[in-house]
Every structure is written in C-alpha cells, then in structure tokens.
Amino acid sequence: MSIILKNIKKQYVNSTDRINVLDNISLSINSGDITTIIGHSGVGKSTLLGIMSGVLYPDTGTVSINDQLLSPSNSALIRKKIISVLFQKDNLLPEFNIKDNLLLPLIISDIDYSTAINRVDEILELLNMEKFKYRYPYQISRGEYQRISLLRCMSNNPKVIIADEPTANLDENNCEQLLNLIVKLNRDLGVTFIIATHDNRFIDISARAYKLFNGDLIINE
Amino acid sequence: MKLNNTKIKFLLLLRFFFFTNGGKFRKTYFFQIIGLYLGALIISLTFSIMGGMESQIFDKVESFNYKYIIKQSLDNDISDEFIDNRGKKSLVRCETKSYDFLINVITYDKLNDFVQDKIREDLLYENNLYNKSSIIIGKSLSAKYGISIGDTITLSDIANVNVVTGNYLSEIFIVANVFKFQFLNFDSENVFIMESHASFLKSENYNFYIDNLQKNKVLGHDSKFPDFGDALISSGSEYSLLISSIKFEKKLYILLGVLTIIISSIMIFNNTLIVLLEKKKQFKLLDSLGMSLNKMLLIMLFCNILMSLFLSGLGLLTTFFIEKLNIWFNVIDYLFIYSPFETIPMNLSINQSIMTLLLIIILTTISTILSINNMKYRLEEE
C-alpha cells in the first residue's frame, strides 16, 4: 500500500498575508513502514496529513494511493476502506459507548452487523479492554481513551493509519503504552503508519522520519 | 443483510443526533416534541369538532328547509314537475288545555313527502300516516308545554281578525309526531301541518319549494331544469351568519394550532443549529471515517422530518382516539354544556389529516434547511 505525494503546494490566506504551508512537497511512503513527520506546532503537519487522508485538498499536486489518484469523488470511500485517521483528541463520539464507537466505522464500511459485533469483541480482547465495552468516553482515562481510539482506527482493518499528534497530552507511561501498541500493530498486522508528532521517540520506531520546516520536507538524519 | 445494516446505521445516527454526551437524551428536544404534538392535536381537534359541528348544523338546516321561491298565490307559471312542495309560513296562536302561546306554522301540500324526504331521521316516533288534522311539533315545545303525541291543539290565525266581530278562524289538530332540532329554538318555535288543512291561514306570500330531489328526478329524464336565478332563496339563509361565525371560530383555533407549530419550527431551527454546532468535532471524526458532512446533514433533515411525521401522526391518532371516546363516553360534551347536539359531532377527514401532516412537515423541513444553511455559512466563515 504505497502512498505517493507529488509537488504538493498548500497556501493559507489571511487578511494580511499568504502563508506557504507546504511548498512543492513530494514524498513516497512504502507499505508496512512507520513514517514519522516531525516539526514544531503550526508548521503544517496536520495539513499534510489532512491532504494524505483526503480531508483537505492541495492547491496543486497529487496524492495517489496504490496508483489510485485521491480525489473528492473517491476520498470518502478510501477513508472507509483503506485509510484510518487518529487525531490528537476527539477520536471517540461522546454520545456513544466504547462498543458503539468501535462498531461505527464497521457499520459505515457496510460490514454485516453480526460480523461487526464479533470484530469489536476481538479488538477489545486484543488489549484486554473488554471491561470498557459499555463505558462512555468520559468514564475512561486519557491513556485508555487514546488506546481505544487506536483500536477504533484498527476496527475495519485499514491498510494505513494516519496519526496526528497521537501522544500529545499523554503522560510518560501512557505514551509508552501507545508507542508499543503502534509497534505491535505494525509488526503483527503490517499496518502502515504515518505519524505527525513533535515527540522524538517516534523517530526510533520509524523506518523513515522527515522534518517539516518552512514548507519543505527534509529527511531527518 | 444490507437492509439490516442500513437500519443499524440509521439507528446509530439517530442516537448521535438525539443524544448528548454520555448517551443521555437531549432535553431541549422535549420542547419541540411537545410543540409539534400539541400543534398537530390542536389543528386536528379543531378540524374534527368545528368541522363536525359545521357540517352537522349545515346538514340539519338543509334537511329542515327547502330552497324556495316566493309567489303571491299558489297559481303560478312554474311547472309542477320542478316543484318538490308548496305552502306558506305564518305566525299563529296556539292553544292547549293549559297554555296559550304564539308559534310559527309551516304548511306543506305534500307533508308526507316532506317527512319522508327531509326529516324522517329526526322524528321521535315511527308514524307513516299523516292526515289533514296531523301536526308535527318540536321536542322542546313538547317538553315546555307538556304536549305529547295524540294531544289536541288549536291553531288560530290572529293576524286575520274580523274587525267587526272580533272573531278569527281556528282549526283543531292532533299531534301526530315530534321532531328534534334543538338548534336556535327551531323545535320550540315551529310546527308543520298540511296545506290542505290550512285554509284558515291567510297569507300574502306562498313558498314554492324546489329541492335537489325533484331536480335529480327531472334531470334523470333528460328534461331541462329551469334556472331560477336570484329568485331561488337558499335554504337556511337565516343561519348563514351563525355558520359564518362557526367558520370564523374554526379559523381562529386553526391559527392557534399553526402558531404553535410555527413556534415549534423556530425551536427546531434553534435546536438543530445548536446540535450541529455542538457536534462540529464529531462531524470531523465521522468525515474521517468516510461519512461526508452533506450526507450527515441530509440524515439530520430526514431525522427531523421523521420526528415531525411521528409526532403529528401521534397528534392525529390522539384526535381519532378522542373521537372514539366521545362516541363511547361523550367526553367532549362536558366542554360544551349548552350544545344543541346530543353528542358533539366530530369528524376528521383524510384530507384534513393530510393537510395537517403536510403543514408540519413543510415547516419542519424549512426550519431544518435554514439551520443547516446557517451552520454551513458559519463553517465557511471560520
């Protein structure tokens, strides 16, 4: 599942300035890799991830996933079937309990209800989190919230998980647990991870790491 | 399998829109729920009661009165085949054993036809035989003066007094039946007799009664029915003011119901906008899962329409239930103590039900679309 970005440009315009957030960026991500994009806050990491997941569109340039060009017409379908997105926060619907939160992506992907229920049980068993099944997001800790969010991303077997600052607001211990979970999922299930972070620990587990600076993407040595 | 999944998806989204954090039902929905239900109930009840009353009064007035043409004498140029009945109306003195009072006498040359065609349903006794001495009186008159079937009463034409002798003509009648029409004192002020036994009554005007019954018979024979124009006085025209006032009252009540629904629609607008703005983050998440914002907004619109449909349906069902309760236990009669009906007529038609449903759905759709547009506008502003 390769992702190729070609000549991506993105500009934000405010009342006084034009800001080139992404300036002619090209990038190729191999299947099964963990790729980290580091950079300071506001440098454009989230914009780059948004473009990769098809939530945002570049001013110029193309994104292709497995030789399929990402466009407004197919981006929703690609997010249903191939790509899953993990945000820094607000990854679970507060109206639903954990079971329904894990069920939702499966139902949106048109997976049969009984299969989806079994899948939810499997996912919760994977991390011994069955006891959280009927709890609501406000009833669990931040670390548990983020781990379950990662499981929610995993529920419909995506090929790629795009994570935007997944460990922000987490303490050391929870950060470590989430990191280990990402490694485990990558190693055992071959899921490709693209992670935007300013946490340098992700560099150690990545096949490649890039630094986003002044609109340019450079390999982090 | 597909349908099942669609159902689950819909139920999940329904919970998403109607529930708040922690899976609790959003309380602000209660106001619009109550408003929509009450609006539908007020409109349908008004249609049912006022419409029922209006049609019942109209039907009664129609049944007790012919359309008629006034002529100076019974000899005239109108062919018999076009006339249902003929007679006159006079104010006379009425004497019983114990009482003496004034009353309107309405005469018909074909009293049997009048009874059979017009008022048969409203007679208290089954009597097919009426002769020259027969008189049909009203139930209220019967109760007021203690006159019952078989009693004798004397009618006198006091407007036709011999100025020299001071005498006036009289005839004796036997009560042959009693009708009920407790409406604007009709059955305490009017009696019916045969024209052939009303020669003691002098009248300057004669009425030629022309009704649809004869008209239908004539038209059935391909004859051309004459157009009497303005000369034909509509039946019960003296009640037109009352019927107009009932119609006006009905409009007022319906306006009240429509106002309730409009207020509910404003609540729907506010509530939908609040829900949409509160769930902006969740929309972002759902978008990342492959469910586009437009699709969710469409589902929100569908949810609101479904809710309105359900609540207005519930309002209509309540009206139908009240109609049944009224038939079984006369519940509505307690609200109308001086009603002229034994049971308040209630009649909600299919057309009125559809009209109520459509009104609510249209207003809900407009208010939801406005709130969705408002939300989109705010998102674009951001």
Image (tube, coloured by chain):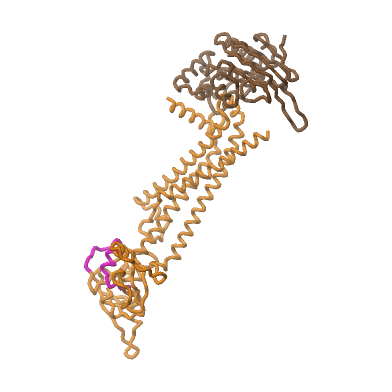
Chain colours: A brown, B orange
The relative height of residue B18 versus residue B109 in the rendered view (above or below) is: above
- At which x and y percent is residue B219? 31, 63
Residue at far right of view: A16
Q: Quadrant of the C terminus of chain B?
A: top right
Report the front residue among B193 and B338: B193
Q: Is residue B195 left or right of residue A2?
A: left
Residue at far bottom of view: B164
Q: Which residues are magenta?
A: B106-129
Magenta-span inclusion, residue B240: no
The relative height of residue B183 versus residue B328 in the rendered view (above or below) is: below
Report the front residue among B106 and B233: B233
Q: Residue sitting at 71 percent across and 16 percent down?
A: A217
- At which x and y percent is residue A141? 60, 20
Report the front residue among B221 and A208: B221
Quarter of the view holding residue B83: bottom left
Q: Is residue A98 visible?
A: no
Quarter of the view holding residue B64: bottom left
Q: Residue sitting at 40 percent across and 60 percent down?
A: B339
Q: Quadrant of the N terminus of chain B?
A: top left
Q: Is residue A140 visible?
A: yes
Magenta-span inclusion, residue B107: yes
- At which x and y percent is residue B249? 48, 58
- At which x and y percent is residue B251? 49, 56
Number of marks = 0
Report the front residue among A158 and B63: A158
